Image (cartoon, rainbow, N blue to C red):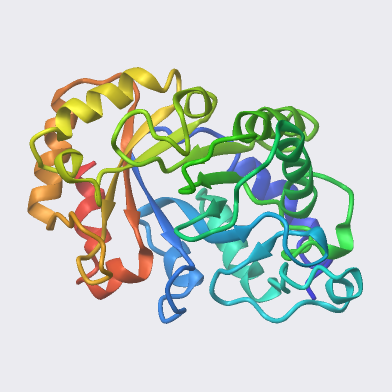
């Protein structure tokens, strides 16, 4: 498993990845498909500014530890096996790519959830507990160092993709994350979420979203508030007004090939984005694509969208 190789460069990378994005940019999810489009491919693509690793799909799995399900992982390390944390996996094969992303100034967030995930919480104390666990495993925490999937690498934060319909404990989790972030002054950390476009989202309600840095609303799979549909711009305005100081991103499908509904081709999506830009919203910050491999398979869709943000 990867341990100390990155120690000498971590502080340098932190400085490069510690600032808020300076202008509209493209975020993307990677890891939920097979790995024919690698994380290195994504990190070398100048179209993207933020990469969400998809997913950590279970909060309390083997040994009471979380479970990772993203592409490119090896089996659990010896230390993880000994602790019973067999769902964490050895992520050393992704370390070089994460470094590549961060050295290029891209933020790398770990997305929590996804469709069918087990990321519900029973209480605020559960939310605080999982925030501490994730901070130690992926952020600047110092407990359970031998169990960290990516060794000394510190990710740039966490993305919430709770689709369970149950927000219990999420506000407490977010607040605990933010408290933990203050304990590491070597870099900045960020929180994001991907709510559905009907407002408010049942799984990620307004009080949670207003505590975040980035909100990439899924303007797909939801009928009238899908991109370019009858309620799209009204929904954009409602979300912009309802998330406090968080930055708003237009979440879109990169392809119509994955069974989701509401794919907008490049011309339609760019036209919708221009309509949003014409609204002069104070917190518009760009777009998000689901998913990186689908974008490549759809004629490098991301390269058509990024210049129009």
* Residue 303 picture location, percent across and down: 24, 60
Q: Residue at x 78, y 63 (%)?
A: 151
The N terminus lies in quadrant: bottom right
* Residue 96 picture location, percent across and down: 63, 69
* Residue 163 picture location, percent across and down: 46, 48
Q: Quadrant of residue 250?
A: top left
Q: Nearer the viewer, residue 38 or 239?
A: 239
In the image, is 250 to the left or to the right of 52? Answer: left
Q: Is residue 208 above or below residue 155?
A: above
In the image, is 26 to the left or to the right of 128? Answer: left
Q: Residue at x 44, y 58 (%)?
A: 115
Q: Quadrant of residue 145?
A: bottom right
Q: Residue at x 77, y 44 (%)?
A: 140
Q: Is residue 131 above or below residue 235?
A: below
The C terminus lies in quadrant: top left
Q: Nearer the viewer, residue 175 or 12?
A: 175
Q: Residue at x 23, y 23 (%)?
A: 237
């Amino acid at each position: 498993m990867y341990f100390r190789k990155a120690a000498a460069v971590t502080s340098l990378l932190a400085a490069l990845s510690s600032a808020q994005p300076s202008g509209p940019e493209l975020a993307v999810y990677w890891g939920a498909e097979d790995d024919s489009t690698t994380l290195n491919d994504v990190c070398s693509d100048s179209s993207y500014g933020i990469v969400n690793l998809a997913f950590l799909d279970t909060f309390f799995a083997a040994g009471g530890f979380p479970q990772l399900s993203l592409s490119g992982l090896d089996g659990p390390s010896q230390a993880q096996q000994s602790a019973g944390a067999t769902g964490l996996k050895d992520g050393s094969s992704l370390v070089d790519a994460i470094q590549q992303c961060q050295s290029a100034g891209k933020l790398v967030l770990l997305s929590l959830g996804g469709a069918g995930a087990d990321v519900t919480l029973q209480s605020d104390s559960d939310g605080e507990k999982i925030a501490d666990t994730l901070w130690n495993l992926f952020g600047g925490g110092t407990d359970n160092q031998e169990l960290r999937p990516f060794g000394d690498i510190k990710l740039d934060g966490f993305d919430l993709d709770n689709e369970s319909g149950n927000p219990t404990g999420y506000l407490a989790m977010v607040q605990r994350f933010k408290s933990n972030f203050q304990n590491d002054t070597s870099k900045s950390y960020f929180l994001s979420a991907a709510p559905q476009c009907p407002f408010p989202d049942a799984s990620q309600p307004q009080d949670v979203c207003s505590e975040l840095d980035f909100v990439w609303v899924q303007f797909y799979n939801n009928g009238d508030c899908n991109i370019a549909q009858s309620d799209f711009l009204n929904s954009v305005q409602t979300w912009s007004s309802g998330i406090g100081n968080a930055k708003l991103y237009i979440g879109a499908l990169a392809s119509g090939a994955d069974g989701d509904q509401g794919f907008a081709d490049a011309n339609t999506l760019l036209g919708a984005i221009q309509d949003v830009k014409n609204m002069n919203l104070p917190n518009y910050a760009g777009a998000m694509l689901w998913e990186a491999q689908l974008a490549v398979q759809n004629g490098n869709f991301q390269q058509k969208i990024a210049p129009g943000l």
